[in-house]
Image (cartoon, rainbow, N blue to C red):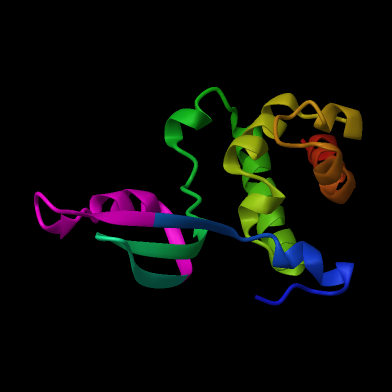
Amino acid sequence: MLIPKDNQHADHFFNFMFKIITIPFDRDTKTFHEDVLNKSILNKKIKSYHVNFFQDGENSYWSVFFEYDPLIEKTAEKELDGLDKPQRILLDTLKAWRKERAEKDGVPVYIVGTNKELLDIVRKAPKSAEGLKEIKGFGKSKVSKYGNELIEIIKGFYSKT
């Protein structure tokens, strides 16, 4: 595995998620229990995987390494309860911005902001970077990277409505 030597590309290199599953052979049923693997990949978009078979003494195993992106489900309708029409429009605006920003940065959308984080932003409508830090998931780094744009979108939206 190559690791970037410069910090310019290190951000994008480490923005992947991975999991390693080791499945032992069950001597009683004479099978490998694939349900462990199936549960692990549920709601994930598999980007790549590597499978290895190995033995440790008399025990046999399958080991699976996979890189993935979580599937971001559409915001459930129940989560939208309590949002008025302007708030729903702001949420759609933030999702469109998130998509553009993620494409520009070369990262998955959930890195920029999850649906829950965007919902919290809509509900709290922070007017400053400090207010944005009160949103769970928006720490110093995320606020530094996306805060100004988000605050501009929120202020611009509410100045028009």
Residue 71's spot in the image, x, y percent?
47, 54
Q: Residue 123: which quarter of the image?
A: top right
The residue most toward the top is 82
Q: Tell whether position 148 is magenta.
A: no
Instruction: Name the residue nearer the viewer: 106 or 101.
Output: 106
Q: Residue at x 87, y 44 (%)?
A: 152
Q: Could you say where residue 155 lies in the image, as x and y percent from the top left?
A: 86, 37
Give the quadrant of the C terminus: top right
Can residue 156 be seen here?
Answer: no
Q: In percent of the image, x 80 and y 45: which residue is there?
A: 142
- Residue 143 is situated, as x and y percent measured from the top left of the image, at 84, 41
Residue 119 visible in the current orientation: yes
Tell me which segment is drawn in magenta: 22-48
Residue that appears at 79% across and 26% down: 134
Looking at the image, residue 47 sits to the left or right of residue 10; the answer is left
Q: In the image shown, does 153 or 101 lie closer to the viewer? A: 101
Pick the front one: 64 or 91: 64
Residue 44 part of the magenta segment: yes
**In the foreground, 102 or 44:** 44
Q: Residue 60, percent across and down?
A: 27, 62
